[in-house]
Image (spheres, rainbow, N blue to C red):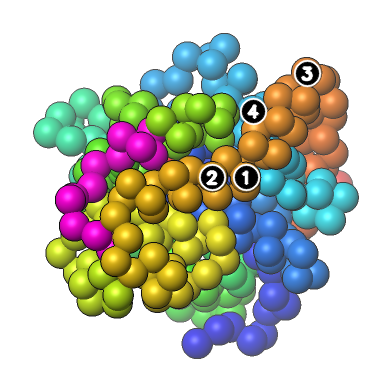
Amino acid sequence: MSDTSFAPRIFSGIQPSGGLTLGNYLGALKRFVQAQDAGTDTIYCMVDLHAITVWQDPAKLRHATRELAAGFIAAGIDPARSILFNQSQVSAHAELAWIFNCVARMGWLKRMTQFKDKAGKNAENASVGLFAYPALMAADILAYHATHVPVGEDQKQHLELTRDIAAKFNHDFGVEFFPIVEPVIEGAGTRVMSLRDGTKKMSKSDPSDMSRINLTDDADTIAQKLRKARTDPEPLPDSLDGLADRPEARNLVNIYAALADMTPDAVVAQYAGQGFGTFKPALADLAVDKLAPINAEMTRLMQDVTEIDRILGEGAARANAIAQPILDQCYDIVGLVRARA
Ligand code: ATP
Ligand code: LTN
């Protein structure tokens, strides 16, 4: 059920915690561009405050933030039509996150699987920020009264928490102030899996570079990684049911479908009976075809980081103009005195 009392507005974020992967492209960036091109009000954010919940080398963080901005633009985000900025330049995110730290319950955050995965066995030594991460994510979205959030499947639980925070705030203060957001998770590319293990998500933080395709990989590297991707000796079946217990094969079919804008059913119908000796080179050609122009444009944009910083500054000013009045109203609802002229 979507919240009809708020105008449709899309918000999403990506962490500048490393290079972009094919998973980020298919699960997030590609959808961001579709939403923008459909004429929806779109706000996209490089969530640098989320990135520092785990250690980031300052010089690398700066580089990753600019490279991520270049990735957004190269993939088709137009800073004139979408608002594009980095989170730390708009203080409303951190301020609203504090309010939400006081709304969210310990028990809710303890259930978050991303925290458990990222903190691992050494949870006592994880940062407080890593634990509180979902309250900041809720603030990102709700500071703009966004109604729809396109993300990959791994973020579903965080969006449910965002809904819980909005509902509890509205209930506690007797208002209808924050919208109950809708996750937008659909299609074949919402969970791209590792090329080495079809049961693990493709991740920019996986120690093995062979497990992922980076948007900065050149054509030969992409072809080589797909050729070496783990599969099985069977040919492709004639229906998707035949891939139920073949996760690696299913992943490559999904990637093909998402890149070609086809359904996975149509892909197996086209390649039924063919082995991976045929399918993998076809997939490599398709991937290179789609990713090479993005790669080339990122390289070009990265030659002028002053221009990237200018775009982010301008985006931050536009974002702030929306978020600040919402934050002011929120503080007033909570009973925080605002006496400055
Ligand atoms: P890490 O892999 O290091 O945990 P991440 O790439 O998951 O980082 P973000 O950069 O914040 O973290 O993710 C940005 C967006 O990309 C999110 O919407 C996320 O759901 C999506 N995404 C990330 N990995 C995948 C994947 N393998 N398949 C589909 N979508 C993905
Ligand atoms: N938690 C997300 C990144 C993220 C985000 C957001 C996504 C931070 N804030 C707001 C959508 C909306 C991740 O780790 N992929």
On whether residue 233 falls in the magenta region, the answer is yes
Q: Which is in the foreground here, disc 2 or disc 4?
A: 2
Q: Nearer the viewer, residue 255 or 36?
A: 255
Q: Which is in the foreground here, disc 3 or disc 2?
A: 2
At which x and y percent is residue 188?
44, 66
Q: CA distance from mark 3 to mark 4?
A: 10 Å
Determine which residue is flagged by label 3: 303
- Magenta: predominant secondary structure element? loop
Q: Nearer the viewer, residue 203 or 246?
A: 246
Tell me if the residue at label 4 has its CB under 8 Å from ligand 1.
no
- Residue 67 has which mark? 4
Q: Quadrant of residue 333?
A: bottom right
Determine which residue is flagged by label 1: 289
Amino acid, disc 3: Gln
Tell me if the residue at label 3 has its CB under 8 Å from ligand 1.
no
Check if mark 1's residue and mark 2's residue have beta carbons within 8 Å. Answer: yes
Amino acid, disc 2: Asp
Check if mark 3's residue and mark 1's residue have beta carbons within 8 Å. Answer: no
Amino acid, disc 1: Asp
Q: Quadrant of residue 165?
A: bottom left
Label 3 crowd bin: few (<14), some (14–19), many (20+), radius 10 Å? few
On whether residue 288 falls in the magenta region, the answer is no
Q: CA distance from mark 2 to mark 4?
A: 25 Å
Q: Nearer the viewer, residue 49 or 325?
A: 49
Amino acid, disc 4: Glu
Determine which residue is flagged by label 2: 285
Residues shaded magenta: 225-236
Tell me if the residue at label 2 has its CB under 8 Å from ligand 1.
no
